[in-house]
Image: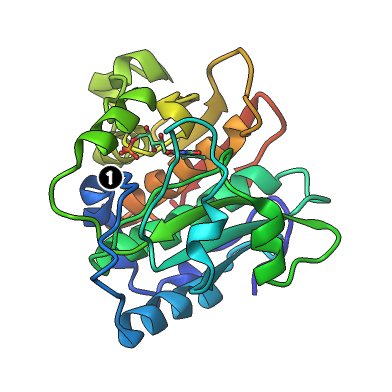
Amino acid sequence: MPDDGLTYKYWEYMDISFSTWHPAIKKRRSRRRFDPNLPITPETLAALEKVCNKFVPFPSARSRLVTESTESVFKGIIGSYGKVKGAPAFIAFIGDMDDQFVQEKVGYTGEAIVLEATALGLNTCWVAGFFRPEIVASLIEVTRKEQVLAITPVGYAPEHESWEEKLMSRFGRSHNRLSLSKLVRGLPKEQWPNWVSVSLEAARLAPSAVNRQPWGFNVQNDDNITVFVRTSGPEFNVSKRLDCGIAMLHLEVAAVNSGCKGEWELLPSPQVAKFKIHP
Ligand SMILES: Cc1cc2nc3c(=O)[nH]c(=O)nc-3n(C[C@H](O)[C@H](O)[C@H](O)COP(=O)(O)O)c2cc1C
């Protein structure tokens, strides 16, 4: 088990089906309507649950798979954004609020589970603002220090989005992403080694609340990338550092996939974390 300090060794978790996460980055898309006639098999649920229980790189962030009362958790949502229907299960992402880096740790941990679900052929959608935390808390054990920061439905969505879903994605300002030229500071692109190019591209594709893409990346030299909160303005009850944690996971998955393992150092605001590869 790694310590809960500012750095940890991610590759200790590599026996998880990590190599399938990189292709899942491009494949994943938020889906909010699920086919109620397509249940998840017990084998697939067991595979997902195994990763929820095993991928715990930080003791203050954890994931729990829940297969009951799914509809009631997503009820009471304001407007159409976030209205999730027909999912046979959901996963709760839980953080220990005494940890100053809890948001990025929950984002990082949760996105690994989302990519695992995607690799298993399931559909997901991060939901942070619009769910009923009291119902989630009644379904799983949560300590007094903990909070359910986000959940995702899991299930099978029809291949094509319904008009309702298309409308919702538009409210979430769709699936478009900013170009790297708007996000990156530091070394000019021409001087980036391959691991930096592929890692930044993967980080850019991360999902974020209302697709706000609050991250920025600083490439100081060829062996590290710092993630920081680039945007100012209100958070609307969902921490931008949680979004940045999701981007961190994408960044590292791509770095490791290109042969570069490294370590994270978590940093105080407005910086988020620095990833330094091993010599
Ligand atoms: C932390 C977080 C919270 C989100 N909250 C909601 C939500 O409450 N309701 C919803 O419908 N979508 C939610 N989303 C999904 C985003 O709108 C979606 O990821 C974004 O528009 C990008 O689209 P994509 O995931 O299809 O690439 C959330 C995403 C993240 C990362």
Q: Is residue 167 left or right of residue 3?
A: left
Quadrant in which residue 47 is drawn: bottom left
Q: Is residue 5 left or right of residue 229?
A: right
Quadrant in which residue 4 is drawn: bottom right
Query: Which of 102/1 is in front?
Result: 102
Q: Circle 1 sits in a helix, a strand or a loop, which is it? A: loop
* Residue assigned mark 1: 29
Observer able to see residue 186: no
Quadrant in which residue 219 is drawn: top left
| Amino acid at pointer 1 | Arg
Image position of 22 with respect to 165: above or below? below
**Residue at point 24%, 71% (across, down):** 38
**Quarter the N terminus occupies:** bottom right
Q: Count residues near mark 1 (Cα–Cα under 10 Å), then give few for <14, some for 14-19, many for 20+.
A: some
In which quadrant of this rendering is ligand 1 seen? top left
Observer able to see residue 217: yes
